[in-house]
């Protein structure tokens, strides 16, 4: 069994922790091999190729690192486990203080695997050419670039026109991503097990615009209905592409799922409350 450990090389503690995990895995089991790689460059082909040979991926860091690790896990259909060294860390499970105990449980198979749905995100030109194709675990965002003017974004769901939003952008989030950018933009928190999408306008210039909750099977399309020229699409916060005024963003259910390894699945609301308190303490200490 081959274990790949992914970390953010811009943070020294993550590098040290990843090395310690690798040594612990090799020390505790003769049947496991392990290597550690940075997730900073997602288009680094050697990393993509090495990830395809793994049986398990481990993320060392916060939710951002987990999402970048999940990118490889989704493409290669392998499970992923997260050690939390970040500030919030709702996707990650295990905190940094008990690595060896956690590794022993992984080796012994004392865990469950939780499936999380993904979205298929496509950008097509006016002529129908496929320009961008990615899978989203958390969310997909159509947004204006900084310092550009208000965007007028048209939303249709299952072929029916819903509304045109004067806004900074629109977030389409899964249940997994409901506690990320969508929440910051005023969207609802979705309890795990409710397989829905949340459509949340960002800084809308309208008093009657509200987030929309759709069925997981819904097909969503976004387009720009007034000339703008400075838009982009972002998937899970780290895979981006330019969006032209004549392009169409289409978001549909995906047949790919992320397999998250859970050793001691936390209560969702307890984890949300605890992580929020931890973040406030850290921010207060930093200030």
Image (cartoon, rainbow, N blue to C red):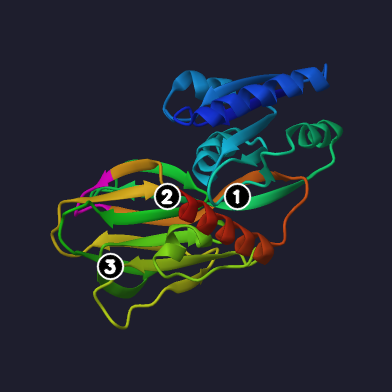
Of residues 32 and 130, which is closer to you in this image? 32
Q: State the image coordinates of residue 193 (x, y, percent, origin top left).
A: 67, 64
Q: Earlier in the sequence, mark 1 or mark 3?
A: 1
Which of the two marks, 2 or 1, is nearer to us in this view?
A: 1
Question: Up-down: is 34 above or below 185?
Answer: above
Q: Earlier in the sequence, mark 2 or mark 1?
A: 1
For this view, does 181 lie left or right of residue 16?
A: left
Please check the rendered image and state whether residue 59 is part of the magenta-colored stretch, yes or no.
no
Q: Secondary structure at mark 3?
A: strand
Q: Secondary structure at mark 1?
A: loop
Residue where numbered disc 1 is placed: 91
Of residues 70 and 196, which is closer to you in this image? 70
Q: Main secondary structure of the magenta part?
A: loop
Of residues 240 and 62, which is closer to you in this image? 62
Say which quarter of the image contains residue 162: bottom left
Magenta residues?
242-247
For this view, does 228 lie left or right of residue 74?
A: left
Residue where numbered disc 3 is placed: 154
Farthest residue in the bottom direction?
208
Residue where numbered disc 2 is placed: 121
């Amino acid at each position: 069994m081959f274990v790949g450990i992914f970390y953010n090389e811009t943070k020294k503690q993550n590098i040290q922790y990843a090395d310690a995990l690798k040594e612990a895995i090799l020390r505790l089991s003769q049947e496991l091999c392990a290597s550690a790689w940075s997730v900073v460059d997602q288009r680094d082909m050697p990393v993509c190729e090495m990830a395809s040979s793994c049986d398990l991926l481990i993320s060392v860091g916060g939710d951002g690192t987990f999402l970048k690790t999940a990118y490889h896990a989704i493409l290669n259909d392998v499970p992923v486990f997260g050690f939390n060294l970040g500030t919030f860390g709702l996707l990650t499970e295990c905190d940094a203080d008990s690595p060896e105990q956690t590794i022993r449980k992984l080796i012994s198979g004392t865990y469950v695997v939780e499936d999380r749905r993904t979205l298929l995100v496509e950008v097509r030109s006016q002529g129908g050419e496929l320009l961008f194709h990615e899978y989203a675990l958390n969310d997909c965002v159509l947004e204006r670039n900084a310092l550009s003017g208000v965007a007028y974004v048209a939303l249709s769901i299952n072929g029916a026109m819903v509304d045109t939003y004067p806004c900074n952008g629109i977030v389409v989030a899964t249940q997994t991503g409901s506690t990320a950018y969508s929440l910051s933009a005023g969207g609802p928190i979705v309890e795990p097990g409710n397989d829905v999408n949340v459509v949340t306008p960002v800084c809308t210039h309208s008093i009657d615009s509200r987030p929309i909750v759709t069925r997981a099977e819904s097909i969503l399309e976004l387009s720009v209905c007034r000339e703008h020229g400075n838009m982009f699409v972002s998937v899970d916060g780290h895979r981006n592409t330019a969006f032209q005024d004549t392009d169409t963003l289409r978001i549909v259910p995906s047949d790919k799922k992320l397999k998250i390894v859970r050793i001691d699945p936390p209560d969702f609301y307890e984890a949300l409350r605890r992580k929020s308190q931890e973040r406030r303490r850290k921010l207060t200490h930093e200030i």
